[in-house]
Image (tube, rainbow, N blue to C red):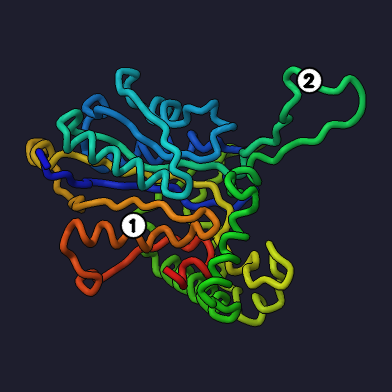
C-alpha cells in the first residue's frame, strides 16, 4: 500500500428501538451527530476532511443522499463531497473500506466514514401506480421496511434465510435462545458498567412541547430477557421453525462514524491513531443462506494477511440472527 491507514477517532449515537426515542428523527440527523462528534474528537478542522462516506440501506426516506445531508448538517463545508453506500448489512463497514482505499491510493488523506439508519422512518410506498393507477377502489401500500428486510432473489424475509441456516447446519432452538439471553446479559452488564459511555454522543431529541429530551443509552438491551420468556415465543418466519423475535436482531435507529487518515497525515496533525487498518475480505454466498457470508470473507482476509484465527484475541460478529451467529 502507498500509505498506512489509521483510524483516529469515532463516535456513535445511542441505539434507538423501532418507534422509540428517535422515531421522528431522520437517519441523516443521527448521522450528522456522529460525524460532528468524530471530527471534534479527532481534533481536526472540518475543512480538512477530503470526503464523507456513509452506509445507508433504507434510502427511500432520505432522497437517496443521506451522506451529503448528514455531512452538511454536521457543519462540514459544502466543498467536502459525500457518498452514500449500500452493501446491505455491511454498508457502514464497507464505507470504512472505501475510505481506506481512497487514502491508500493517494486520492484522500482524511475521510469520515460510517453508517446511519432510521428504520422507524422507512415509509410505506404506493408501488406501480405512477402511470396505471386505478380510477376507483382501494389500493395497497408496500412497506419499505419489510422490503429492506427481505431477500430480493428468493423473495422472502431474511428470517427465512436464518431458518435455512439453522436447518442446514443443525442449529437448535435452545442454542439460539441461549445465545440471545447471553447477548442481552452482556450488553446490559456493559451498559451498567458504563463501558459504552465513551463511544456514545448523547442526542437531544426535539419534543412537540417543552424542552428536548436527552437520550444517552441504548434502548434495545433488555435486562428481563430469560430462557423461559424466549421459549414461549412462536416461530416468526416459518411454521415449526426455530427463529423467533427473541433470537433475532432488533430493528433500530442509530448512526456511527470514524475518522480515517493516512498515517503520515495523522503524524503531521499531531493526532494519535487508535487503530491501524490491515486488510479486508468480501465474499458472496447463496442468498438463501446469506448469514454464512462472514465465513468465506474471514478466510479471505486471513489468507491475505497470514494471520491465524488463533492469533486473534477478540472477534466482533454481527448478530442478525442467533442461528447465523452460532454457525459462523
Q: How many marks are shown on the rendered structure?
A: 2
Residue 276, percent from left and from top: 18, 52
In front of the other: 282 or 221: 282
Q: Dot 1, how many residues are within 10 Å of its Cα: few (below 14), some (14-19), or many (20+)?
A: some
On the image, numbered disc 1 is attached to which residue?
297
Question: In the shown orientation, is residue 287 left or right of residue 160?
Answer: left
Residue 96, percent from left and from top: 31, 43
Res 327 seen here: yes
Question: In the shown orientation, is residue 183 left or right of residue 159?
Answer: left
In front of the other: 141 or 295: 295
Tell me the tag on residue 200: none
Q: Earlier in the sequence, mark 1 or mark 2?
A: 2
In front of the other: 1 or 249: 1
Quadrant containing the C terminus in the rendered view: bottom left
Residue 12, percent from left and from top: 40, 48
> At 55% across and 39% down in the image, what residue appears?
58
Question: In the shown orientation, is residue 146 left or right of residue 46?
Answer: right
The quarter holding residue 164 reads bottom right
The reply to whether callout 1 and callout 2 are in contact (CB within 8 Å) is no
Disc 1/disc 2 C-alpha distance (Å): 44 Å
Residue 184, percent from left and from top: 51, 70
The quarter holding residue 121 reads top right
In front of the other: 318 or 120: 318
Quadrant containing the N terminus in the rendered view: top left
> At 35% across and 60% down in the image, what residue appears?
296
On the image, numbered disc 2 is attached to which residue?
132
> Tag 2, which secondary structure?
loop
The quarter holding residue 77 reads top left
> Tag 1, which secondary structure?
helix
> At 21% across and 60% down in the image, what residue appears?
303
Res 204 seen here: no
Amino acid at each position: 500500500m502507498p500509505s498506512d491507514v489509521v483510524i483516529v477517532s469515532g463516535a456513535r449515537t445511542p441505539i434507538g428501538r423501532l418507534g422509540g426515542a428517535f422515531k421522528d428523527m431522520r437517519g441523516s440527523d443521527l448521522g450528522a451527530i456522529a460525524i460532528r462528534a468524530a471530527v471534534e474528537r479527532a481534533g481536526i478542522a472540518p475543512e480538512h476532511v477530503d470526503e464523507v462516506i456513509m452506509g445507508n440501506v433504507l434510502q427511500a426516506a432520505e432522497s437517496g443522499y443521506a451522506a451529503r445531508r448528514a455531512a452538511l448538517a454536521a457543519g462540514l463545508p459544502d466543498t467536502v463531497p459525500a457518498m452514500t453506500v449500500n452493501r446491505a448489512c455491511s454498508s457502514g463497514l464497507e464505507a470504512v473500506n472505501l475510505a481506506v482505499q481512497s487514502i491508500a491510493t493517494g486520492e484522500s488523506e482524511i475521510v469520515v466514514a460510517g453508517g446511519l439508519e432510521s428504520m422507524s422512518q422507512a415509509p410505506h410506498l404506493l408501488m406501480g401506480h405512477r402511470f396505471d393507477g386505478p380510477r376507483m377502489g382501494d389500493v395497497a401500500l408496500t412497506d419499505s421496511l419489510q422490503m429492506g428486510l427481505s431477500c430480493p432473489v428468493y423473495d422472502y424475509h431474511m428470517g427465512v434465510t436464518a431458518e435455512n441456516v439453522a436447518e442446514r447446519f443443525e442449529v437448535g432452538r435452545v442454542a439460539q435462545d441461549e445465545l440471545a439471553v447471553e447477548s442481552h446479559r452482556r450488553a446490559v452488564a456493559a451498559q451498567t458498567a458504563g463501558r459504552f459511555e465513551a463511544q456514545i454522543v448523547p442526542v437531544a431529541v426535539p419534543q412537540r412541547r417543552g424542552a428536548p429530551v436527552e437520550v444517552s443509552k441504548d434502548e434495545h438491551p433488555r435486562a428481563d430477557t430469560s430462557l423461559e420468556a424466549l421459549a414461549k415465543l412462536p416461530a416468526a418466519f416459518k411454521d415449526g421453525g426455530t427463529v423467533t423475535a427473541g433470537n433475532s436482531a432488533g430493528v433500530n435507529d442509530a448512526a456511527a462514524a470514524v475518522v480515517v487518515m493516512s498515517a503520515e497525515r495523522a503524524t503531521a496533525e499531531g493526532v494519535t491513531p487508535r487503530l491501524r487498518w490491515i486488510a479486508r475480505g468480501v465474499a458472496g454466498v447463496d442468498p438463501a443462506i446469506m448469514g454464512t457470508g462472514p465465513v468465506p470473507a474471514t478466510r479471505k482476509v486471513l489468507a491475505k494477511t497470514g494471520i491465524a484465527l488463533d492469533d486473534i484475541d477478540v472477534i466482533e460478529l454481527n448478530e442478525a440472527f442467533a442461528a447465523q451467529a452460532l454457525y459462523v
